[in-house]
Image: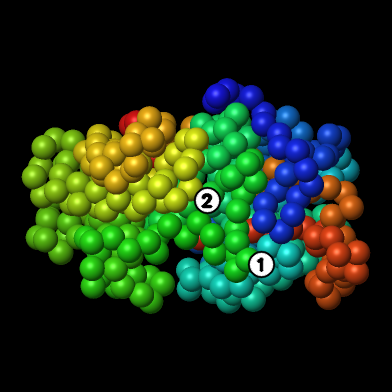
Amino acid sequence: MKATGMMSSVPGPATGTGFGETKTSAGLVAGVDIGGTKTAAGLVDPSGALLAGATRPTPAAEGREAILDTAAELVRSVAGDRWGSVTAVGVGSAGVIDPERGVVVSATTSLTGWAGTDLRGGLSRRLGGLPVATANDVHAHALGEHWRGAAAGCADVLLVAVGTGVGASIVLGGRVRHGPHAVAGHAGHVPVPAAAGAPCPCGGTGHVEAVASGPALLAEYLRRGGTGAADLAGVARLAAAGDPLATDVLVTGGTALGQAIGGLMNVIDPEIVVIGGGVTGCGDPWWQPVRAAIAAETLPALRDVPIVPAALPSTAALLGAARLPLTITPTAMTTATATGTADTSTGTLPRSVTDAAAEEPPFTRKNP
């Protein structure tokens, strides 16, 4: 049963495949959300209450050191005079992140030089050696929704984020799954018929992100001769007013996304599906084809699975990032050295365990 607003916990320690029961009950934690355009930080208590928050533009073109500096400055800013009570930091970041080393394995060019960054060690050193737990930002979003949002009380969750890209996170048995190669949840690279031959930002072709992301929807509207909108919000307004071209663009993209989600549901068998990201603000002209395509693709036993909008569109990633250090057993939090490597002689996870979020277009109106 879904119990909205209730904290959920799952027995067992954290492992290389996810995050387990809350282990830290005292002190405050800081959550950081690093995206291609903005970086946000928040101070969170163990119950999941967001006590303070701050946001700055991500210095994406200035490279990894500037990005890490900004993140550290934000953490100190939100902590303020409560700095001495901060026990750990959790980070949700764009990119594919090694779950045991806290290193960015790969990233898009939206963050200059981000691939290869020692995210865990670099931030910990800037914060006086505080433990730092890291995750892919969509995984952080899922943890936030699972903790205090739309999926609270659900053990098996599929979260899909649709914005500048299309990403997902899979929670099974209360644990985020990132896979042995740290790429679990990259739903944007599921093939769909509407994307046949279309180039995807990953370098492949035929993937749903190529036709269902925010930039792809706007590009398709303009490619087909649309002149009444300069951004996706404008396309959504036209569709809501009955404009046939804008409506068809949203139907095509929404249908492709729904087909991908339906296929994933057949594999995962989730208790609930949560959809977030800025594209969800397109309203009924987008939500209706998404839901219809999901219903057409899923097996009969899944037809009653709730398909719901994210409940925490602006804070889920922060809360989920803050959740990370709360879900790691103390014995699994080994020490990062001065060079940023981890002491793994005990065979436990590194001190900070890690797991590309969809950047949100500048409107987040929800319409379930």
In terms of depth relative to the viewer, which is nearer, 214 or 259?
259
* Left or right: 229 as drawn, with respect to 323: left
Q: Amino acid at mark 2?
A: Ser
In this orientation, which residue lies closer to the viewer: 45 or 342? 342
Image location (x, y in percent) of residue 320:
63, 44
* Depth order, front residue of 276/230: 276
**Residue 280 appears anywhere in the view:** yes
Is 350 left, or right, of 177 in this rendering? right
Quick one: label 2, few (<14), some, or many (20+) residues within 10 Å? many
Q: Residue 191: give x, y in percent of width and height.
A: 33, 63
Along the horizontal axis of the image, is 115 left or right of 203? right
Q: Which residue is mark 2?
A: 169
Q: How far from the left and from the top, in percent, is residue 106?
A: 56, 73
Instruction: Report how far apart the C-alphas of labels 1 and 2 lie in the structure.
Output: 15 Å
The N terminus, quarter of image = top right
> Measuring 62% from the left and 49% from the top, which residue is drawn there?
176
Which residue lies under the disc numbered 1?
A: 98
Count neighbours of disc 1 (C-alpha within 10 A) and say few if under 14, some if 14 to 19, many if 20 or more.
many
Residue at point 44%, 51% (across, down): 267
- Residue 166 location, quadrant: bottom left
In the rendered image of this protein, does residue 171 appear above or below residue 135?
above
